[in-house]
Image: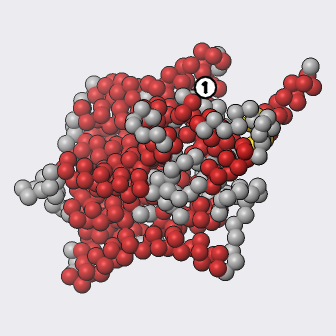
Amino acid sequence: MDNPLTSKNRIPLWILWCCAVIIFSVLYLLTAQRGVSWQDSGMFQWRIISGDIIGHLGIALAHPFYIILGRLVLLLPGTNTMFKINSMSGVCMAIALANLLVITARYSGKIMIGIATVMLVAVMHTVWWLATVAEVYSMQLAIFTTELLILFRLLEQPSGKTAVLLFFFNGLGLSIHNLALLPLPVYIIAVVTLARQKKLKPATFLLILTAYTAGASLFISLIIKHVSMHGDIVAALQSALVGIYAQAVFNMHFFGNYFLVNAGLISLNFINIMLPCAMIGWLSLKRNIGLLPSGLIMAITIIEALFVIRYPVPDQFTFLLPTIAMIALAAAIGISVLTHKSDVQKRLVIAGCIFSILMPPFVYAAIPMFAARIGIEVQRPRELPFRDELRYWIVPWKHNERSAELFARTALSESVPDGTIICDGTSLYPLKITQRLEQLAPHVRLTTTFEIKRELQSRNAE
């Protein structure tokens, strides 16, 4: 296929990339949550404002690079601390989409196909949802798509410098999220293959190892710290690789306790033409981009998809972003194949793309209203005040989502002057953040059932 980024009439790459970052940042910043969040998002907000680099869930869940960048974001002008933290996800997602635009334009052969593809991705449910709250996944996707850009550059023009850069970024990604480990074997296969073809020198492997270590130095430092404190290398490595979720990480069953709910949320990403186009793209992958690139793309896609569908955690759908990126790449190639077959097919694909970009927001908004009208309700084991569960999970924009904020202020106000609130992991952090930032009910004690049990055990031991 023609390369739109190297033709004489090309749009300069940096302009294309910058425009995408600006446009998608505006979308996500306008719809980002303004205040405190529930669950893991609240935990990230608390860790950033309190400077907790390690956390309490193990090295695998420390995400130190994300926390450090969050601390730097707090230095930006503006008084809304939570909005600044939440906005980081939107900007990172915009960078990931800009990277994806360059990739899909390159492999589809058309800039307009690249633009259409990332616009489809931008309004997909999981993408939009995670771009509006404090979460680590959009930053991980920004690094992952950067790795893909470098990988494809390496395949086109093999060089030691490009290989070193690839492994540096993958190491850096490890300090953001352990998802960085999933494509690592594929990158190793790529450089080994190029070395066997005499396109990379043997000395490159030493440089690659050095670069990876440098990129992952922050993550490695946490392992070293753990060993120095506890003297147990095996425990440190276990904490680094799986944290407290070893059973979930190594699960081999595809239908866990949370599968149905997450399958429903995942399906919201594909109320468009993405999957049919991706299937066509996969079928024509080898013919359009060559044996080695197509093999590596399929390997990464399969690894990422398998990890998600058999990972039995409540927020399973949030791990879908790398898989979506790989599906989008195949879809761009599929769109290119379809538009080259006939004028009628080209017009149908264009109409399908436009419909697929405009329709999802209306679907997201309509589902909670339709469910309420016919009497469908979603209940948690423990109800969260002010939170409409269906709307919370289905509607991706969060600029008007204030349930955690309203809950925290109400609970603290009702507990003054010196009451005690027993929290779970969902409600603890909104309360701690509101108490600290707003100086509300400063003498109210916040504790958890775990801390109470530990106190009782300590008293009984005495």
Find residue 282 and report its horizontal and vertical position in percent: 36, 64
From where the camera sits, is residue 404 visible?
yes
- Residue 236 appears left or right of 205: right
Instruction: Identify which residue, 339 or 386, lies in the foreground.
Output: 386
Q: Nearer the viewer, residue 177 or 394?
A: 394
Q: Name the residue that disc number 1 marks.
A: 236
Quarter occupied by the N terminus? bottom left
Q: How many marks?
A: 1
Percent from the top left, x then y, of residue 43? 60, 40
Instruction: Check disc 1 and give the amino acid type.
Output: Ala
Residue 276 rendering spot, x and y as whole percentages? 40, 72
Residue plotted at (6% across, 56% down) = 8
Q: Residue at x 49, y 73 (%)?
A: 363
At a point 57% along the width and 34% down the height, the residue shown is: 47
| Residue count near mark 1 (Cα–Cα under 10 Å), binned few <14, some 14–19, many ≥20 | many
Residue 429 shows up from this direction: no
Determine whether, in the image, residue 20 is placed left or right of residue 365: left
- Is 187 situated above or below 68? below
Task: Please tell me which residue is depicted at 39% across the width and 37% down the height of the picture.
Answer: 77
Q: How is the image coloured?
A: secondary structure
Residue placed most toward the observer, 85 or 181: 85
- Residue 157, given in percent of the width and then of the height, sits at 19, 42
Task: Quadrant for residue 239, please give it.
Answer: top right
Vertical relation: 149 (above or below) 226: below
Establish if 220 lies above or below 181: above
Q: Residue lying farthest left? A: 8
